[in-house]
Image (cartoon, rainbow, N blue to C red):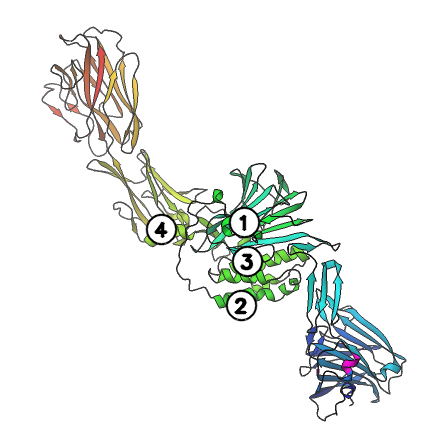
Amino acid sequence: MFCFLLNLAVITMLTGKATSETFAGSAEMNITLCPISYYGEKYEQIYVSFSANTFAVCFKGLYKPGVKNDCILVSKGAADRGSLEVLKKEIPFGSLVHKLLPDLLNSGKCVSIIQLTDGEQSEIEQLELGNFGTQAVLAVKTLSGYKDDHVEVDLQVNGLTVSKKKLEASETNNGVFLDISGCRLSGRVYKTNTKVLEPNICSTVTCQVNGVANAISDCGPMERCHSNGSCVMNSVCTVIGPAVIDFIGRVHSVPDRCAYTLLGSSSVPELQVLGVFQERRRKDVFFLDQVLLQLKKKGLLISMGQGSRVHLSNKELKLNASGQVIHGVEFSRNQSGVTAKISACDGTVSVFFDGNTALIHMTGPSVGTVHGLCDDSKGTLCDDKVSEHSATDCEIQYEDTVDGTINCNRATEWCNFLTQEPFAACHSHMSPKPFIAACTQTLCKYPAVDGLRCLFLQAYAQICSSHSKLTMEGWRSKSRCSATSQASCQNRFCSAHEFCGPDGSKETRCYCRAIFASRHKPTNSFGEVIKCGPKTVSVALADCLLADAGIDHSALHLNDQSCKGEIHEQTHMVIFNFSSSNPCGSVITRNDDQIVFKNTIKTHNSSTVGSIIRHGQINIDLSCYYTEPVVKSLAIKVRQSPVVQQITSGNYVYNLTMTPSPPPVGMKPADETLRVEMKTEGLDGELIALVTDSCWATDQPSSSGSQRHDVIISGSCPANQAVRVESNGQGTSNQFSVNTLRFSSQTGYVYLHCKVKLCIRKDEPCVPKCSKTERRRRRVVPTFKDENNALITLVWSH
């Protein structure tokens, strides 16, 4: 077999073949020893077949009309069989082949020779595929058995003709050489060493000798090519975790939990887009938690938060899939997240947020001036920080423990998945490098949990789809990324100290943020907040801490199993309440001058001990200590109406009222009866009783005046039969009646002094027991102490 490619190379033919095989009809053959780069695509297999008039050499499978394939179709004459031989021989640069094909810049390495024959073994035609590195040559030569006047050669890529030639047999009898080198870009094929202006992508495409096509855009870094060939503002800023990929592909990292300006633009001057960051599982890595839309002229602030919730002036907006225009902002919501769109004369800004990722898309006829993290070319992070919407402690830096599950090498390998198909199809529209950098930086310091690693692939696919209309089909299955967790979090609300994440069972739940958890987990606490009120005791537990410990809050109860906690809709704190009217099995005791309430939060019976003590994971003992209330002295001049005074004592705030009936008007004659009521408001009558211990009258303001007349003697009993005491020690009020009197030496006022006492009804008898005779000597007194006796003085004139 004569190889005219080698003959033109002026090289002596050497014996010996690298490989040889024959075929009849169709066949698949291996050319690994001499692979061919056909228009920039390297192949090591060929598929040959015959049809009525054509011989086909294809690279992706047997030739079928209408099927996308890379094929060489040649008129076959009478041939119906053939053979393949591969010869290894170098064709140096400068050979006659190179002179005939001036764009051929590489030396030849080997040749695959296909000789076609008929059933009579007549030589019909010879095709040669020459390997010139990243370039390739097709040689066509008709032999003595070829009887037609011409030869048609159809070069196809993806089923479409790239080049088609009709050659005279007189030419092919001497051999014809065709350059089948080139480059591919976005489905188009370019010849080697050519530059082509492509208006549809606003770029000049250069096909290099190495088979790589480079597109140099005529648009600026923040512009995209419009369908009419003009460049317009069309760029996306992406925020994932702590990473901000700005409009021109630079990657910035947010270092704290503060608020930052993401975008401000002269194209849409009314709008300022802010981002507020929070920690999640680690104290030293921060995620975008809220996107704030500041409408400057209207003075409005719209918050796009977790769970696809949108608030205007702290009022939640109810959104649906159809567009709703609110104060000039068009909102829409679907299962992926919420999109807000605002337009002005010179541009449009669209903000998408799904609780994890923000995509800020700006379009318009011109770029204008832009500032914020999405275009941080002129400023610094400090310049973009917004104190007004930042927590006062947002800049505090926290250290966290080393996470042994973080593997930076594995993270880098994962992030480079963006260089492979199906993402590679989008590389000409958008570089994957910023996303790979952001992905690697984040996953080298934060564990690959909660679907985080898939967010970078998802963001790239979303942006690519909006820029190029490519759908990126199959990327989730190839990367094993599920959309379930992200979609489920769209309908879950978490409180300020929580964030949403998958729970390992294809569902989601709220997890404690790291800083919040670090305040409680070292002490095995559940974030207990105890409030000891005057009538009610409440304790709150953080549901996320309970869930982290594997405890279902609905299984918890107080000593009384019917007393369960209720979860607060906004804070997700589990709240237990009990009081004297609904004690829920509380134990009430007295310790010196304190009243002690004790109860237990538990899932099974457990003994109670003091303060807050934990038995394992699901039993919490708690106590409330109250300073015993004290009724303070109150001096009242009896005129025409009672006097009310508010008194604060320990944990109690209450009113004490002293009411005479009827009220004395002017001077009162002796022997007229004065009825006095002592009444408190704000004390729990189930727990506390008011006891009038003793009363006496003097002729001067001092209770120890020289002239004294007893009304109720110490021990709460009437001093004589003219005094009547009612309801003493039975509740939070009592009454007594006494005849008005005057002292012989007095011309002004009579002062009635009373000592009162509060009594704990559970621990001691509060109702005095008095003998009907010998009242001054025989009485049974309550067993409470006298430390808190208070002196009350009633004054009337006569």
Q: Considering depth in this image, is 332 or 23 the residue closer to the camera?
A: 332
- Residue 147, image x and y in percent? 89, 83
Q: Earlier in the sequence, mark 2 or mark 1?
A: 2
Q: Which mark is residue 520?
A: 4
Q: In this rendering, which labeled residue sits more in front, label 1 or label 3?
A: 3
- Determine whether the residue tagged by mark 2 lies in a helix, strand or loop: helix
Residue extent of the magenta highlight: 97-108
Q: Name the mark nearer the viewer: 4 or 2.
A: 2
Give me the disc on residue 251.
3
Please, is residue 652 above or below residue 457 in the view?
Answer: above
Q: Quadrant of residue 27?
A: bottom right
Measured as percent of width and height from the top left, residue 606 is found at 28, 48
Give the residue at mark 2: 413
Q: Is residue 626 magenta?
A: no
Q: Nearer the viewer, residue 363 or 734?
A: 363
Q: Read off the residue under disc 1.
A: 490
Is residue 492 or residue 32 the one in the foreground?
32
Q: CA distance from mark 4 to mark 3?
A: 35 Å
Task: Give the Cα distance between marks 4 and 2.
Answer: 37 Å
Task: Check disc 1 and give the amino acid type.
Answer: Gln
Q: Earlier in the sequence, mark 2 or mark 3?
A: 3
- Residue 185 vs residue 115, the one in the foreground: 185
